[in-house]
């Protein structure tokens, strides 16, 4: 599938952004509330990177399952199923983390938001820099036009 290059580049850029967000948020978290701030920054960045990367990974795996046919309903079932699972797991995780003393929730939330925004920017940059060849139903020079 030709979109694999885009998804892989998106994962690479997203990992780089997550590393930068983890370092910056970790330093800010330490300055704000010490160790719970660092933990909040690292957990928040890890959660955002994992859940956002899971979407691209599910698309790569779904593409392999259907052998590149993205119009196959199984492709959509895999991707939408992973999105639904991510939603439920994220809600359970956030509700569990809400009552933990070892975590600064403000730093956690800020690092999740920073990770999401950074990942979106990384996805846009990956999309802009990746060339995906595409030819529709246009006959190329030297080819005979097929009749419907």
Image: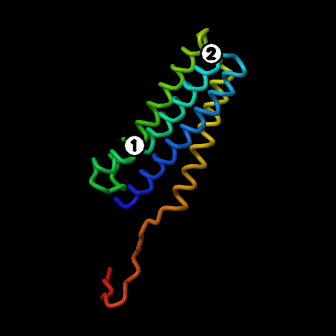
Residue at figure coordinates x 54%, y 14% from the top left: 96
Total labels drawn: 2
In the depicted structure, whether residue 70 falls above or below residue 83: below
Quarter of the image that includes the N terminus: bottom left
Residue 103, percent from left and from top: 61, 15
Residue at figure coordinates x 54%, y 50% from the top left: 123
Residue 22, percent from left and from top: 58, 32
To which residue does mark 1 refer?
A: 57
In the depicted structure, whether residue 22 falls above or below residue 137: above
**Of the pair 11 and 66, the residue shown nearer to us:** 11
Q: What colouring does the structure picture have?
A: rainbow
Residue at figure coordinates x 36%, y 56% from the top left: 71
Task: Measure the C-alpha gap from mark 1 to mark 2.
Answer: 31 Å
The residue tagged with tag 2: helix, strand or loop?
helix
Residue at figure coordinates x 39%, y 47% from the top left: 59
Nearer the observer: mark 1 or 2; the answer is 2
In the depicted structure, whether residue 43 falls above or below residue 50: above
Quarter of the image where one finds residue 142: bottom left
In the depicted structure, whether residue 62 falls above or below residue 101: below
Residue 30, percent from left and from top: 67, 21
Q: Which is more N-terminal, label 2 or label 1?
A: 2
Q: Residues within 10 Å of mark 1 (few under 14, many from 20)?
A: some
To which residue does mark 2 refer?
A: 36
Quarter of the image where one finds residue 45: top right
The residue tagged with tag 1: helix, strand or loop?
helix
Residue 35, percent from left and from top: 62, 15
């Amino acid at each position: 599938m030709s979109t694999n290059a885009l998804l892989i580049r998106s994962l690479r850029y997203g990992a780089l952004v997550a590393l930068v967000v983890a370092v910056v948020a970790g330093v800010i978290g330490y300055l704000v509330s010490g160790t719970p701030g660092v933990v909040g920054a690292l957990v928040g960045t890890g959660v955002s990177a994992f859940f956002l990367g899971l979407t691209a990974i599910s698309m790569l795996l779904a593409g392999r399952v259907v052998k590149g046919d993205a119009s196959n309903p199984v492709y959509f079932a895999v991707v939408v199923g992973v999105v639904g699972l991510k939603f439920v797991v994220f809600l359970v995780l956030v509700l569990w983390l809400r009552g933990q003393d070892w975590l600064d929730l403000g730093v956690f939330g800020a690092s999740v938001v920073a990770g999401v925004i950074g990942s979106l920017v990384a996805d846009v940059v990956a999309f802009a820099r990746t060339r995906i060849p595409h030819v529709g139903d246009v006959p190329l020079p030297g080819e005979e036009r097929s009749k419907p």
